Image (cartoon, rainbow, N blue to C red):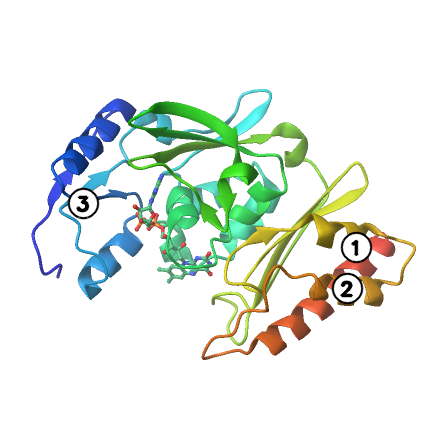
Amino acid sequence: MIPFDFIYYRPDSLNEAAEVCQSLYVKGKSAVYYSGGSEVITMCRAGNIRPDAVIDIKHIPECMPLSVDGQHLNIGSVCTLNQIKESNLFPLLRLACGRIADHTNQCRITLGGNLCGSIIYREASLPLLISDAQVTLFGPEGKRTVSFQSVFQGRIQLKQGEFIVQVHIPTWALSARYAHIKKTAHEKIDYPLVSLAAIWKDGNLRIAFSGICSYPFRSGEIESVLNDRTKPCKERAGQAVDLLPEPAYSDAKDSGEYRAFVLKNTLQALLEEWENGKI
Ligand SMILES: Cc1cc2nc3c(=O)[nH]c(=O)nc-3n(C[C@H](O)[C@H](O)[C@H](O)COP(=O)(O)OP(=O)(O)OC[C@H]3O[C@@H](n4cnc5c(N)ncnc54)[C@H](O)[C@@H]3O)c2cc1C
């Protein structure tokens, strides 16, 4: 049970959603966008958030597509992880979505919810960070389409009242060579110790990480080291770990030292598979 009252809005258009949100802010009221709702409901129940209003964006047509238009794969923010997985239009994103939660939750969790949620892993961001993806946002100031990498610094940087409408992935990425590896401590379905997505463009490896730090990231310095094929795989993997943007993440379950150890071995194995032509 949610132990407080809130107003539920169900806008049918982008303008209506942004206008409702803006009118609430002007009145000094708090609002959250609602997509799959799994995190919003859990946080309301637990008392972590207490919004005056919830704005359900699942019925806005522009937030729903899942199709290729010739230049891009366009994915609406309210598409569930399971819809993305079943479509198999972007194999690397299929793998990333397929390793987030279990099937039941994948039928509910949405792409927008995963990218904007408060849980630090946001694993669906990894394929977007390395594929020149763009993202369309909408808010009280209107619509803007920007490079995903430019607005996603650990988490997406939204202006007040803004929400994700769609992501757009260029078609080259849909058929590029790729790899996805997620290491968990015990169970296959769990938060990551280390999760990585890799794609090859013009023979160069691009790679993004989750789990190893307190936010998902892509690092040009790490990619330079990993692409230096004059050095042995083991040395490159070790150097990459030394270049993490912050000390490896520690929590009650796993130490940063252990995560760094797992990352090093995972990178070495990935590089060796690449060297041996297995990827
Ligand atoms: C059992 C379980 C296991 C999980 N395992 C993993 C995992 O392994 N890896 C991982 O990365 N995550 C994992 N998660 C986290 C999950 O991806 C997030 O909780 C996600 O936020 C849920 O998505 P949702 O669509 O239900 O979000 P909602 O509850 O609808 O929204 C979450 C937040 O995002 C905001 N939001 C939603 N859509 C938009 C939008 N289009 N534009 C702007 N803001 C928006 C909401 O306002 C809210 O703040 C797991 C969650 C569960 C329940």
Which residue is denoted by mark 1 in the rendering? 225
Q: Quarter of the image containing the N terminus? A: bottom left
Residue corresponding to mark 3? 30
For residue 123, above or below residue 150: below
Within 8 Å: ligand 1 and the Cβ of disc 3? Answer: no
Q: Position of residue 218 (x, y in %)?
A: 62, 50
Q: Secondary structure at mark 1?
A: helix
SS at mark 3 in the image: loop
> Which residue is denoted by mark 2 in the rendering?
239
Q: Nearer the viewer, residue 234 or 144?
A: 144
Question: Splitting the image into 4 quarters, where does residue 262 fall?
Answer: bottom right
- Kind of residue indicated by mark 1: Val
For marks 2 and 1, the one nearer the N-term is 1
Query: At 62% across and 34% down in the image, what residue appears?
Result: 132
Task: State whether label 2 is within 8 Å of ligand 1.
Answer: no
Are the residues tagged 2 and 1 within 8 Å (C-beta)? yes
